[in-house]
Image (cartoon, rainbow, N blue to C red):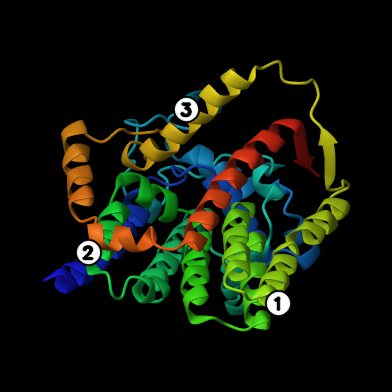
Amino acid sequence: MLRRAEAFLAAAVVLRMAFHAVSLPAFEGPDEPQHLARIRDFARQPWSVAFEGKWVDADIVGSVLAHPCPLPETGCPSYGSMPGRFNILRAPAAPPPSAAPIPNEESKQPPLFYLAAGLPLRLLGLRPDPPAALLYARLFSVALIAIALCGPLRRIFGGHPAAAVAGLIALLSPGAAEAFARCSNDAAVFLWAATVIAALDRRPGPLKMAILLAVGPLLKLTALPIAAFAVAALWLEGRQVAAAAGGAASALVFPVQAVRGWIGSGALELQRQRPAIAETFGGWLAGFAQTAYTLVKAPFWAMGWSLLRPPGPLLGVHLGLLLSFVNPEYMSELRQGVGLWLVATGGVLLVIGGVWVARLVQVKY
């Protein structure tokens, strides 16, 4: 019974995200114009320009202004003045207004995902307009989620169907589609993280582990905590060579980002933040707790740039279904072994320490 439910829910997750990708208004996903610009740079610009990724092209800016958005004061039409849902499949009623390029706030992101997404368009010689390229990028992200569900996640939860059902129910939440079925590098990190966890169970050699742990941070810097978890797990298993190789490989992102910063007339700098933050430790702790609460709440609360809130009763039913499928036996397995406790505790300390250090050190290029 649970196996059938697992297969049904996996298909439902992929179809739900595909529907979200085509129905969500164009550029409604947070930062989609900026991520799209990075992808199109690798699809059509010289390699040096794409590697730098400094600008959002004028035609993307014009396309954003031709579609409705929640901030009409920026020059775009307001919702209600023209269709929003499924407008990514339709041409705008009027041609996009002329616009100038703008600096790309996502230029700080490592380049690997944008290269992977833009390279197929480049190899095929395709030059889609911004809405068509946006639809391609959204469906590319959905395909990455489908690969994760059918590949590494299926291996991870192969003997735990109840836990798999709980995870799939979580992926049906509004925030999951918003995070993954849009033009961004988050789906790639999701697939990579699932692949890392599955690989740890298969005990790959140092070279394979090094290659795998080098990939994640080059997709997005938020992959670094997962890489640190993998290195700690390898070390505690007595695989020190693989741990050292993986740790060194995951740091490859720093020289890559330094080169990108140098090309972009800057440098990767570590400097004390100025002015200093006048905040007590208690105030910081309260802010950290609020941030943690927001991270837990967001997947069940917010979706889209407009931050639409789904009906409360529906979210309550959804959360109840999720909790009902958390298998106590599976959870007890996660609590076994001092090594896993040490890794989990180290991960928590790493996150807290990283937030604290971020208050003192500013990373920029």
State which mark lies toward you, 1 or 3: 1
- Look at the image and tell me whether residue 186 can be seen: yes
- Could you tell me if residue 304 is visible in this image? no
Quadrant of the rendering where the C terminus is positioned:
top right
The residue sitting at 48% across, 55% down in the picture is 341
Task: State how far apart marks 3 and 2 are (Cα).
Answer: 31 Å
Label 1 vs label 2, nearer the camera: 1
Q: Could you tell me how far apart the alpha carbons at marks 1 and 2 are, in whole angstroms?
A: 35 Å
For marks 1 and 2, the one nearer the N-term is 2
Closer to the camera, 357 or 13? 357
Crowd around label 1: few <14 · some 14–19 · many ≥20 (10 Å):
some
- Position of the N terminus, as image quadrant, is bottom left
Q: Earlier in the sequence, mark 1 or mark 3?
A: 1
Locate residue 204, reporting x and y percent.
Answer: 57, 82
* Label 3 Cα neighbours within 10 Å, binned few <14 / some 14-19 / many ≥20: few
Which mark, residue 170? none
Name the amino acid, label 2.
Answer: Ala
Q: Which mark is residue 290?
A: 3
Residue 210 rendering spot, x and y as whole percentages: 67, 75
Cα separation, mark 1 vs mark 3, equals 39 Å
In this rendering, the answer to whether 59 lies above or below 168 is above
Q: Nearer the viewer, residue 65 or 107?
A: 107
Residue 257 to residue 359: above or below: below
Q: Which residue is mark 1?
A: 241
Q: What residue type is disc 1 on?
A: Val
**Number of residues whose C-alpha sits closer than 10 Å to that of mark 2, classed few (under 14), some (14–19) or many (20 or more):** many
At horizontal 82% and vertical 60% (from top left) the residue drawn is 255
Task: Identify the amino acid type marked 3.
Answer: Gln
Q: Quadrant of residue 277?
A: top right
Q: Position of residue 52 (x, y in %)?
A: 77, 56
Please name the residue that numbered disc 2 is placed on. 162
State left or right for residue 188 relative to residue 25.
right
